[in-house]
Amino acid sequence: MNEESLSQLYLKDTAFQNLMQKRIFNVLLVASPYDAFMMEEDGRVEEQLYFEYVSLNLSSPPRVTRVATTEEAIAQLEQKRYDLIIMMPGVDVSQTFSGAKDIKKIYADIPIVVLTPFSKEVSRRLSNEDFAGVDYVFSWLGNVDLLLAIIKLLEDKMNADNDINEVGVQMILLVEDSVRFYSSVLPNLYKFLLKQSLIFSTEALNEHEQMLRMRGRPKVMLARDYEEAVELYERFGRNMLGVITDVSFMREGKKDSQAGLKLAAWLRERDPYLPIIVESSEEENSAKVKASGWQFLDKNSKKFPVDLGNAIKRDFGFGDFIIRDPETGNELLTIHDLKDLQRHIFDIPTKSLLYHASYNDISRWLYSRALFPIAEVVKYHRFRNEEEAPLVRQLFFDLIVKYRKMKNRGVVAVFRKDRFDHYSNFARIGQGSLGGKGRGLAFIDSIIKKNPVCDNFNGVTLTIPRTVVICTDLFDEFMEANNLYPIALSDAPDEEILAHFLKGKIPDRLADDLLALFEVVDRPLAVRSSSLLEDSHYQPFAGIYSTYMIPHITDKEVMLRLASDAIKGVYASVFYADSKAYMTATSNVIDQEKMAVIIQEVVGRTAGKYYFPSFSGVGRSLNYYPINDEEPEDGVVEVAIGLGKYIVDGGLSLRFSPRHPDKVLQTSTLDLALRDTQTRMYAIDTEATPAEEFKVDDGFNISRLRVQDVAQTGALRYMVSTYDHMDQVIRDCDEGSGRRVVTFANVLQHKVFPLAELTDFMLTTGQVEMCRPVEIEFAGVIDVKDQNSKGTLYWLQMRPIVERKDIVDENILGLPDSEILLRSNSALGHGNIDNVSAIVYVRPENFSSSNNALIAREIEKINRNFTERNEGYVLIGPGRWGSSDTALGIPVKWPHISSARLIVESSLSNYRIEPSQGTHFFQNLTSFGVGYFTINPASADGFYDVDFLNAQKAEYESEYVRIVRFANSLTIGINGRKGTGVVVKPNQ
């Protein structure tokens, strides 16, 4: 029962935007100028309605058009569509009713209401009229609230079938035949309901959702005789919140002085728990009503409206939920909202819980707040004896938790200090933009919500980390309040810019919100950039700005200082030299860039004094390095142990296709596994003294650990294997004395964690939702000890890969080596690269990896000259471009090679490094249509005619680098689907 009920919750969320689809927007008022003037009291009905709507936070107040006669009304109806016609009788009441019949013959679907001043004479006249052309008659008492009530009553009637029967919106049935009385009761009833729904809409997470939630308020249906009441119950009784009935009204065609009591008895037979309020002007009915267990109200009481409001609030589930002792009736506990019920569900005495559940009090209270999915499960779970209490408490608690998680999913909530808790998922501080990464995260959250399988994907939960986004308006406020633009836009060194930003003061309200956040999040925090330009569809700014990690500190003031400095550091990174160079390369203007900041709990768990995720990774839905049976469309994933910064920095990750996880090239042979797998990892030191001053290098406080050391703690189980030196084999376990090798064999081959299936799901679903190839980032925690869960995978980011559609001439790709300068069988990119005539290459004969840092600085200067001239070039060099490890390659950053149109990694006979295949800046390379070749001439994998280049005259030459320029543009073509690419020798 519990599991089935819980699993259904995700499928039954309420789409409030689909409620109240039929509305009254245009009202035609048929009244003499005098009557209309008296009705408006020298004001406009439209204005009064507008202010009434605004005061109750309602949207779309109707427009009122006034005409004087039935003939004018018909003429007006021919010109414009009206949703409601209100007619006020003049001297001749009969003329109004006959006019209504005439209109109804032509416009049968438009409701017609007669609004008449009350008097005995008018009542006498009405008793003789034919009501066939009129839907309702109301008594005008000079209160504009009645117009609101009429409109809402008719809208409720129009939407009842869908909203009540299909969605579960509750209904209040009012049974009353006195025109004067229901004209008085309905305005009070609606005013009460609308104010209550405004209060309860605070369950919503933002203002838009708050407005939508008000559509879930209970509907009111008016019955004017016994048969109409029975018919309404039979249509909507399954979702009836309560009944308010008179005692004397028509039954079987004649006045029955006991009709209300008979109706109440009939209803109670069908629903023993239905609240019934009986109102009567005859005091002798009081005893009968109370004896039957119903609520009695005296119509003659001067405080009848107050009594009615109190009775509805108490019996229909509005207001606070009062937990009572069933034996004494004493109040034991007051529940204010859903969060309060979750907090106190285990505090409610067993007898009280059984009592309230038995009478559907809990579900009714939930229904009144439009919490339909959870209310329905509670209502139909029968709780019969006290022995079931522990299970019932746990069920109700689990329902509330799951519902709150579901409601948080896919919604960008407004951050409120008193509302953000462990079940909050995504909130924003400020009113500006979320930035590119922030929007991407919100989009991911909406995808997860649409796919209930994410809640239990083969024993794993797929989610996003708890996230708060500081919107761009706080960036503007910080910059202006601290007068930072002069230094930010100057050519000052990065360190000087950061120093000025760190001296700045963040807004006080942001500091208060951060302190509230620390009360909830008890993990280290990642403070990430989310600029307006980052992860946009055509110019992804991946990895350009800073991301700081800060440890969790129990001292909240220290935590505030660290978080504030991290935010300032991210803001400052917008104006660093690399960022400005990137802006120039992408033709963007630096002062148009605005920064939102994502504060996110760091995925992971503690092992000893270090905190890190079990694994981190990136994936792409297009694989331009397919091997064996892989296809480019199968996608590619790179995964590593520890923090994802290791992959960003170009470290050795494990590469696999999620549709072919058992074929991992790097672990296919013993030599490759020992040489080309991860030996270092990044983690957060939870015991380190917090930094007094932040640095430009956002990894200054990240610990770089040996995998071998961490594996000894058992924290890397299932991800590492053990090399047995004696038998010269790698065993898929983390036991033994040999070296630990990061193979992910137990995950990929033995399926202890469905990483391949999950990454395939993310890539496939992401590509469908984005309608273009995507790149994703993720991190996960594998539960080694939990029997009920394999762990959690956190979807951290998604951005588009821009795929060029240029058609490459196959004849060019098929040219013989004698006509080719470069040929790669492992080419990244797709299409033709035009307008490139220069080649910058590292001289193989003088190359030594010990000089890689010097070469990086030289190439940075060369690139700057090309950028200033707005020229592109081909860049060729050994090893891994962009690796932070100088032993693996030349440690350039993206801005240092931003004008390269084709980048080539060429192995030397004495320097063979596996290709990098996907550090952060390669996302930018592919996005800008930049090609990437991997060539290994020594093993006949590709071709590189370096002798041809050496024979050309150099435009620039140093000990390590040469630049050769040709008179005409080079012919460069890449077939990304086949992974082949060439650079043709220019004509001599």
Image: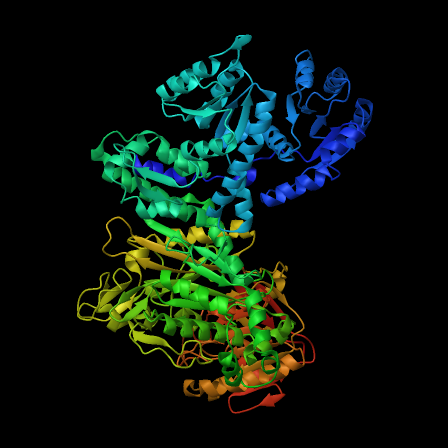
Residue visible at 54% across and 15% down?
225
Q: Nearer the viewer, residue 967 or 285?
A: 285
Work out whether 54 lies above or below 930.
above
Give residue 646's quadrant in the image: bottom left
Q: Position of residue 571 (x, y in %)?
A: 52, 73
Q: In the rendering, at what x and y percent does residue 321 appear?
A: 37, 40
Question: Percent x, y for residue 778?
Answer: 41, 60
Q: On the picture, is 765 further left or further right than 184? A: left
Figure check: 751 above or below 813? above
What is the basis of the colouring in this image? Answer: rainbow
Q: Nearer the viewer, residue 10 or 779?
A: 10
- Farthest residue toward the bottom? 959
Nearer to the camera, 41 or 319: 41
Is 312 placed above or below 106 here? Answer: below
Q: Residue at x 61, y 80 (%)?
A: 489
Quadrant containing the C terminus is bottom right
Residue 236: where, in percent of width, then height? 48, 24
